[in-house]
Image (cartoon, grey):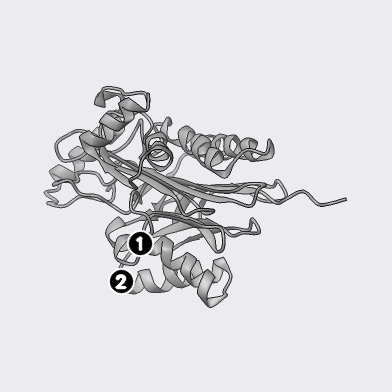
Amino acid sequence: MSLAAPYSIVIHGGAGTILRDKMSAEVESDYRRVLSSAVKAGHAVLAQGGTSDDAVIKAILVLEDSPLFNAGHGAVFTHEGTVELDASIMRGDDLNAGAVTGVKRVRNPILLAQQVMLNSPHVMLMGQGAEDFAKLQGLELVDNSYFHTERRRRQLQRVIDSNQAVAASEDSSDEFEVQKFSTVGAVALDQQGNITAGTSTGGMTNKRYGRIGDSPVIGAGTYADNQACGISATGHGEYFIRAAVAHDICARVKYQGIDLRTAADAVINDKLIQMGGDGGIIGIDPKGNVVYTFNTPGMYRASIDTSGHLDVQIFR
């Protein structure tokens, strides 16, 4: 009797200075509940023999629709008081990928990134053009106000009041998140042996001048290769772009012959720290081993491994 092929999934909801002693039991419970439902939604797809693409999408949709996370409904504000969203997805079998940046009306940017991957000769679309493509693909468009929450408006006002000229990594009004780089992401391995990674974000509070972070950049915030690993990142995007974090980790696995945890630690806890960058990654290797690595006090994260064990964590 042949053993069933392994499958697993891991998700994140951002990394940063997330303090246990400042977080109420009620707030912690809310985060754990949404993380759990997101990872279970993705895992159910895999359990039924579905693709890693669909599992990643299903998990990220739960996070994009939750006001707790900086993606979709509840994303952070730009300096102008609007919400601009980025997302990307990549699959490890054929290295196909899709990404969108600066979209303001697409309810679920991860779905648009998927359509770019599947139905476009391009990898990344931006702004109005991306939204025109979304219309052609029949995706749901909403008024920008759909994404707005009072919590994020307070965060923007705090940053503006502090006279910070640059975008802030969410210098938050929530005491339990002193500083947070919040993005959402998922990586999955399906029963066919294919790895897919996806990432979605609203970027940084008070961002200006069309700033783009690492989340929609293939090789920085998202990367997948069946021969090495799948990675979704969260952190100070400028550093993750400069270090090509997601691709670097997979390249180390592929060409140095080291395991995923060793490769991720080398990039996140050595290379990035030397550069002055904060954040973390989630990843899966071809055997379904799940890895979380971050150099911040906390990261919202959850996984269901090849044995079916559910793990939901926030603090280090």
SS assignment at label 2: helix
Residue 231 in sight in this render:
yes
Query: Mark 1 sits on what residue?
Result: 278
- In the figure, is residue 130 to the left or right of 70? left
- In the figure, is residue 150 to the left or right of 157? right
Asked if labels 2 and 1 touch by Cβ distance under 8 angstroms, the answer is no
Q: Residue at x 42, y 30 (%)?
A: 65
SS assignment at label 1: loop
Residue 166, given in percent of the width and then of the height, sits at 16, 52
Q: Is residue 109 above or below residue 96?
A: above
Query: Mark 2 sits on what residue?
Result: 275
Disc 2 marks a residue whose amino acid type is: Met
Q: Residue furthest right?
A: 1
Q: Residue at x 33, y 46 (%)?
A: 122
**207 or 256, nearer to the observer:** 256
Q: Residue at x 30, y 71 (%)?
A: 275
Residue 116, given in percent of the width and then of the height, sits at 37, 40
Q: Alpha-carbon distance for marks 1 and 2?
A: 9 Å
Q: Residue at x 43, y 31 (%)?
A: 66
The crowding category of the residue bearing disc 2, from other C-alpha atoms within 10 Å (few below 14, some 14 to 19, many at least 20), is few
Q: Is residue 50 above or below residue 298?
A: above
- In the figure, is residue 289 to the left or right of 235? right
- In the figure, is residue 242 to the left or right of 32? left
**Where is residue 159, by image quadrant?**
top left
